[in-house]
């Protein structure tokens, strides 16, 4: 396994990272012991980067238990910010919640520090200076080693960097973005920005959240567990593209999973891409592709099918800023909509 530096932190991480969302017993792998075996197998294969979140059910507990005798081998990342429980304060990026959330994650993970602590979603209700101030204090206290964001808009990345510089606060050192052959929009601004600011980039959804596994074909039965929940898994535009990628993968002599993962980590702005296996066979398949390198010819063919910087449809779980999510922010009152 080769290792890459997470931005300018000096932290060395594997190009494949292990995403732990599917280790939650409520909606992922119901057997924590099986999840522990998968974690140990990934570590034995050279993966040293594990990412989870406080909003992923009991994922942090499962990961913490599995790592109790191997903590020093791992760059451990978790996230805060999404709703946890019914209390309206148990979410967001306020100092009030951050100082509570980090202690909860440390306890569940059974560790005394977190290597990368990430804001799971931008919080429009909280000034970014408040967020960075709280995180800076946690860095100085030794509870976290580096800070990052997830699903940020390019403008949010720039604002946070400006505030950190002008207020003497810690900078976000990493961004976690959705990126795959089907969703290349981050190539326009987000990936160039993370490179410009020396940030590491962790990728989620490199398999198109299931569409790039080879298990979903147009006109065929969709047996993915989340198919009835996520609209993008039955999007005809996305399925049309998959039908063009299947023969390309066959010509290259690769499974679809290997084509998809190798595409993502080939981008110079990408530090690591998350594997999100639920079962051991899924992990075995992904680990078998760690030596795959895509040629310029194959990458050119992918560019012809999905032009750089474009998205084929949208992921259901993509962050939507308030201006897009809330109709009231883009519509004047009825009486003011006419020109005269």
Image (tube, rainbow, N blue to C red):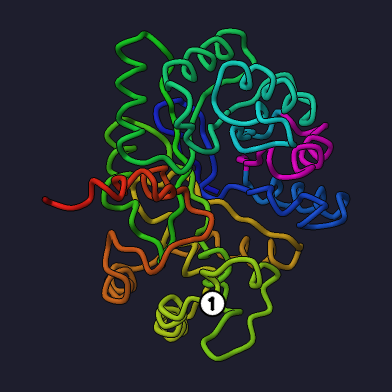
Q: Is residue 35 magenta?
A: no
Q: Residue at x 58, y 28 (%)?
A: 117
Q: Is residue 50 magenta?
A: yes
Coordinates of residue 296 in the picture (x, y in percent): 29, 67
Q: Residue at x 35, y 59 (%)?
A: 184
Coordinates of residue 243 in the picture (x, y in percent): 44, 85
Q: Which one is in front, 23 or 129?
A: 129
Q: Quadrant of residue 201?
A: top left
Coordinates of residue 220 in the picture (x, y in percent): 59, 89
Coordinates of residue 253 in the picture (x, y in percent): 48, 80
Q: Is residue 229 above or below residue 82?
A: below
Left or right of 200: which side holds 116?
Answer: right
Label 1 crowding class (10 Å Cα cut-off): few <14, some 14-19, many 20+? some
Disc 1 designates what residue?
A: 234
Q: Which residues are magenta?
A: 48-71
Element type at mark 1 = helix
Q: Which one is in front, 127 or 261?
A: 127
């Amino acid at each position: 396994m080769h290792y890459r530096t997470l931005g300018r932190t000096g932290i060395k991480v594997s190009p494949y990272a292990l995403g732990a969302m599917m280790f939650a017993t409520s909606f992922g792998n119901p057997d924590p012991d099986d999840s522990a075996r998968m974690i140990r197998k990934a570590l034995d294969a050279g993966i040293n980067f594990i990412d989870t979140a406080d909003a992923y059910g009991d994922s942090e507990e499962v990961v913490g238990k599995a790592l109790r005798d191997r903590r020093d081998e791992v760059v451990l990342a978790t996230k805060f910010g999404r709703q946890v429980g019914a209390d309206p304060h148990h979410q967001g990026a306020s100092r009030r919640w951050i100082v509570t959330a980090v202690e909860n994650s440390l306890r569940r993970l059974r560790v005394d520090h977190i290597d990368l602590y990430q804001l799971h979603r931008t919080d429009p209700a909280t000034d970014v200076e408040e967020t960075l101030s709280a995180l800076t204090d946690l860095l100085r206290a030794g509870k976290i080693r580096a800070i990052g964001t997830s699903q940020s808009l390019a403008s949010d990345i720039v604002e946070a960097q400006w505030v950190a510089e002008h207020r003497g606060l810690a900078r976000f050192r990493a961004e976690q973005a959705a990126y795959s052959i089907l969703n290349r929009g981050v190539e326009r601004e987000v990936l160039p920005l993370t490179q410009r600011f020396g940030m590491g980039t962790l990728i989620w959804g490199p398999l198109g959240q299931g569409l790039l596994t080879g298990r979903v074909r147009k006109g065929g039965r969709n047996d993915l567990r989340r198919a009835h929940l996520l609209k993008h898994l039955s999007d005809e535009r996305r399925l049309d593209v998959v039908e063009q990628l299947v023969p390309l993968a066959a010509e290259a002599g690769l499974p679809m999973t290997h084509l998809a993962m190798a595409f993502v980590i080939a981008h110079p702005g990408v530090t690591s891409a998350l594997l999100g296996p639920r079962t051991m066979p899924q992990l075995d398949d992904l680990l078998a592709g760690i030596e795959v390198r895509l040629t310029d010819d194959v990458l050119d063919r992918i560019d012809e099918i999905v032009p750089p910087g474009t998205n084929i449809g949208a992921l259901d779980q993509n962050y939507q800023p308030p201006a897009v999510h809330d109709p009231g922010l883009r519509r004047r009152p009825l009486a003011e909509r006419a020109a005269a």
